[in-house]
Image (cartoon, rainbow, N blue to C red):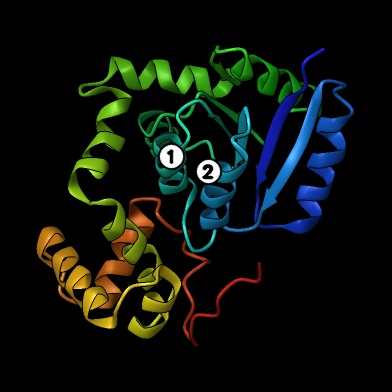
Amino acid sequence: MKRITVLLAEDHSIVREGLRSLLELGGDLEVVGEAATGRQAVDLARKLRPAVVVMDIAMPVLNGFEATRQILHAAPETRVLVLSAHSDDEYVAHMAAFGAAGYVVKQNSGQVLVHAVKEVANGRQYFSSSIARRLQELERKAGGGDAVGAKFRRLLTVREAEVLQLVAEGAANKQVAAELSISIKTVEKHRQQLMDKLDIHDTAGLTRYAIAAGVIESSVQTTVGWVRPPP
């Protein structure tokens, strides 16, 4: 029997350990990598080419939305299954628009998650019942669910979205430059482009926008300073 390779993208190590144990009890599932940040998830997906990435949304450095977009661009054969505590319309619409093949809320059972991984690995979609109802409702509304996420994708480039998250998390220009391996001058340019596009003219405003758009959670933003998450 061909094993289904899985990459876990979850910033809490104890949760990753539990997920690994749970999935590997599924018999034909094999966890081939673990990522604690969205950027690590992109790098590992590019390197390992797993069948499925189980993706949390609230990831540091690069959130689940942007990580999903980059993974599907870098490894289009990989499928992304969202596993999140969030079931708000904005989160659901964003992830569906960014190309996720499925969405399971953490309140579901382990059996549901194992079934969902197998479903998306076999080319199908899987949305837990509460999420499926929300998607149907969004599609009935004007613009549909895809319009919410598509607007965000059109508005910001990949690099601008990366800079926005790091700035909103409290990183200074020098720290953003080091994380993205670009010059401070380039960071300043992207920040200015963000402010011009969004008609926002200070860091606090960018942070508020990032929270409202679901780029970061309100609890993520720091007031003391940004510390790069451990590998």
List x then y, in percent, for residue 154. 19, 42
Question: What is the secondary structure assignment of the residue under circle 1?
Answer: helix
Q: Is residue 69 left or right of residue 150?
A: right
Residue projecting furthest to the front: 47
148 over 172 or under it: above or below:
above
Q: Quadrant of the N terminus?
A: top right
Q: Amino acid at mark 2?
A: Arg
Q: Which residue is mark 1?
A: 74
Residue at 59% in and 48% down: 44
Q: Which mark is residue 46?
A: 2
Q: Where residue 136 sits in the image (x, y, percent)?
A: 40, 15
Quadrant into which the C terminus falls: bottom right
Could you tell me which secondary element the residue under label 2 belongs to? helix
Q: In the rendered view, would you say 158 is above or below 181?
A: above
Residue contact between numbered discs 1 and 2, judged by CB atoms under 8 Å: yes
Quarter residue 146 falls in:
top left
Near-viewer residue (59 or 5) = 5
Q: Amino acid at mark 1?
A: Ala
Q: Is residue 195 above or below residue 85?
A: below
Q: Quadrant of residue 83?
A: top right
Query: Foreground: 43 or 22?
Result: 43
Report the residue at 53% width, 54% height from top: 38
Q: Nearer the viewer, residue 29 or 156?
A: 29
**Circle nearer the N terminus (1, 2):** 2
Residue at point 19%, 64% (across, down): 194
Residue 229 visible in rendering = yes
Pick whichever, 129 or 60, lies toward us: 60
Q: Report crowding for label 2: few under 14, some 14 to 19, many 20 or more residues within 10 A (C-alpha).
A: some
Residue 217: percent from the left, percent from the top?
A: 48, 59
User: In which quadrant of the rendered view does residue 147 lie?
Assistant: top left
How dense is the environment of label 1, judged by Cα within 10 Å: few (below 14), some, or many (20 and up)? Answer: some
